Amino acid sequence: MRWNSNLLVPVAALALCATGLAQTPRYNFGRAATPEEIRSYGVLVGPAGKELPPGSGTAKEGSAIYAQKCASCHGKSGEGTKVGPDLVGGKGTLASAHPIRTPGSFFPYATTIWTYIKAGMPANKPGSLSDDEAYALTAFLLYRDEIIKESDVLDAKSLAKVQMPNRNGFVPAVPVWPETSAQRRQYP
């Protein structure tokens, strides 16, 4: 095979341009997160619930909050819409040909639901819910999936004790979460 030296200059120039562009700073794109935004997204609660803040809520309280802040995306009863996914149902479908993955059917721990609600909902203003609202909405979803009773109070002590239908559906089932903060992976 013969080498064509006429290609050397264009290839070298292209490589230098690509390298230069990759190192160019990007301006006018996004903004730095505020300390308050970082705190609101920093909620990370393990299965044992040790990191849960004070507060509480029931399904009855969550029903009113859901109607006001969640139904427009997730449907009147949590059945899902084109904008937001199903939030209830799916119990017993994970082993079927058409599994329905909802928080109640898929998540192994109720603390995962609380964490997701607290940090990411509502989608148009994530992190804006109070701790009590997050407990109440979690209770509402768990009640709608017949996992807890409507009158059950969820708080920092009771939430981690909720037995989810798919608790043992992940491998390895135990231990999933390090027990001490020293063992936890530190994220930047």
Image (cartoon, helix red, strand yellow):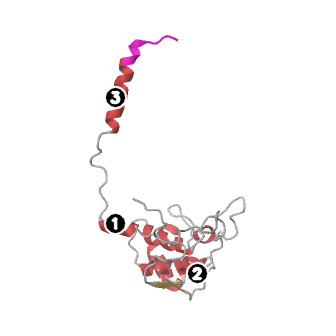
Residue indicated by mark 3? 16
Highlighted magenta segment, given as a residue range: 1-8
Query: Residue 117: percent from the left, percent from the top?
Result: 47, 71
Judged by depth in the image, the label closer to the viewer, 3 or 1, is 3
Q: Secondary structure at mark 3?
A: helix
Q: Is residue 4 magenta?
A: yes
Q: Which residue is mark 2?
A: 161
Q: Residue furthest bottom?
A: 151
Classed neighbour count for the residue bearing mark 2: other residues with Cα under 10 Å, few (<14), some (14–19), many (≥20): some
Look at label 1 and name its amino acid.
Answer: Glu
Q: What amino acid is found at the position of numbered circle 3 in the picture?
A: Leu
In the rendered structure, does residue 183 fall within the stretch colored magenta?
no
Q: Which residue is mark 1?
A: 37
x and y, in percent, of residue 59 in the image? 53, 83
Which amino acid, mark 2? Lys
Q: Nearer the viewer, mark 1 or mark 2?
A: 2
User: Percent position (x, y) of residue 176?
Assistant: 58, 67
Residue closest to the eye, 82 or 105: 105
Identify which residue is drawn at 29% across, 64% down.
34
The residue at 35%/38% (across/down) is 22
Q: Earlier in the sequence, mark 1 or mark 2?
A: 1
